[in-house]
Amino acid sequence: MSANDAAPPDEIDAALGLGGGSPLDALRRRREDVRAYSQSSWKALFEPSDFGDLSAQERLALAKRVAEISASTRLVSRYQALLASAPDASERLEAILAYADKITAAPSAGRPEDLAALAAAGLSPAAIVTLSQILGFVAYQARVVASLALLETSA
Amino acid sequence: MSQPLFTTEVLDWAPAVEPVDLDKATPDQWAALQESGPHALKSAYYHLLVHDAEALRQRSRLYNAIMYGPKGLPRADRELGAAVESIENGCVYCTSVHARFYLQLAKRPDVIEALFRDGVSAPLPPRERAVADYAAALAATPPRVDERHVRALREQGLSDEDIADLANSVAMFAWANRLMLTLGEPRPAALD
């Protein structure tokens, strides 16, 4: 992909409060394809053409929980703002968040019964895959944001 | 801490969630598999992830941009970052692949042997020490990477662009480990 200086601010910029022309912005734009596919991954998970078996609220509540456990206050604020209002409590959402709590902190702690609990709460295999992609993506995003913020303060 | 049984042997991976039945895959799912590379068509991992074709498609593009993008941090260092993240998370499958790639690129079996034996605290040469410490600190939840880790990388000659490349690789494997560890498990490779 060719560099495109006109590419608009993305979710990483939003989390970091990055303005165009800053040193970090220039550093990110050096790898325009990484920047673009980071954002298209975000869109695939949070603004898909079809939400399928995992609602927008469930996706955002899950992302916010992963951000909380990752201690990324910037991402917590971002997902909170997108969530707008508290999601309706349900056993399904509780199961999703309990899974996020366990896997985010200790990815190797997952056991077959944890997947069984998600299925029992009504999640299809497709929903479990999307949930897992969100859990992984926010773990990725939290580290990108933390590493860029650290580069800025370590100047 | 005792180490899981890490290896650089080729492993298989068996899904714990029902993959897409390829006889019933949509054209979009086929396209996403084909775009992910020839290995994806035969891989149970990809057959599972293609439940969400667009998420898989964008993730594969991001993965390739981070791990294979031109210039910047040498690929061996990106693979070492991926391997250390995977060792820290106990992802035997991801470790096997990326320790193997690192060996092919860097020809330093001593580094991998030390990491497998003693984990990230193993004695390492200075550059590998700085890369491994940064990767392990960024791998932690929450990440505990700090200015000392950045300084150590700069002392080894890494630019901010190089450090960002390393961070992207480690972050990508925070994601990959969470898929591989939770959605299935490694198996000894079947003999063809």
Image: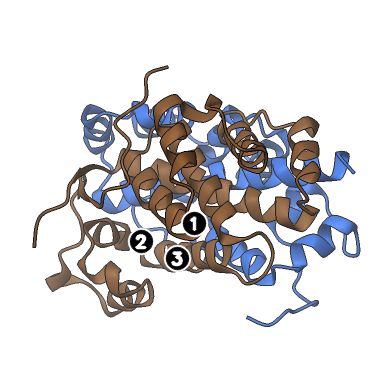
- Outermost residue, top direction? B1
Q: Quadrant of residue A111?
A: top left
Mark 3 and mark 1: Cα distance apart in space: 14 Å
Is A124 on the left-hand or right-hand side of B192? right
Can you give x and y, in whole percent of width and height, for residue B55 in the image? 44, 62
Mark 3 or 1, which is nearer the eye?
A: 3
Which residue is identified by label 2? B52
Which residue is identified by label 3? B60
Between B98 and B145, the residue placed more toward the observer is B98
Mark 2 or 3, which is nearer the eye?
A: 3
Labels 3 and 1 positioned on one and the same chain: no
Q: Amino acid at mark 3?
A: Ser
Between B99 and B123, the residue placed more toward the observer is B123
Query: Residue at (46%, 32%) from the top-left corner?
Result: B114
Chain letter, colour blue:
A
Query: Residue at (15%, 64%) from the top-left corner?
Result: B21
Kindly identify which chain the residue marked by label 1 belongs to.
Answer: A
Q: Amino acid at mark 2?
A: Asp
Point out the image quarter for the N terminus of chain A.
Answer: bottom right
Specify the label residue A45 is tagged with.
1
In the rendered image, the vertical position of residue B73 relative to residue B108, given as above or below = below
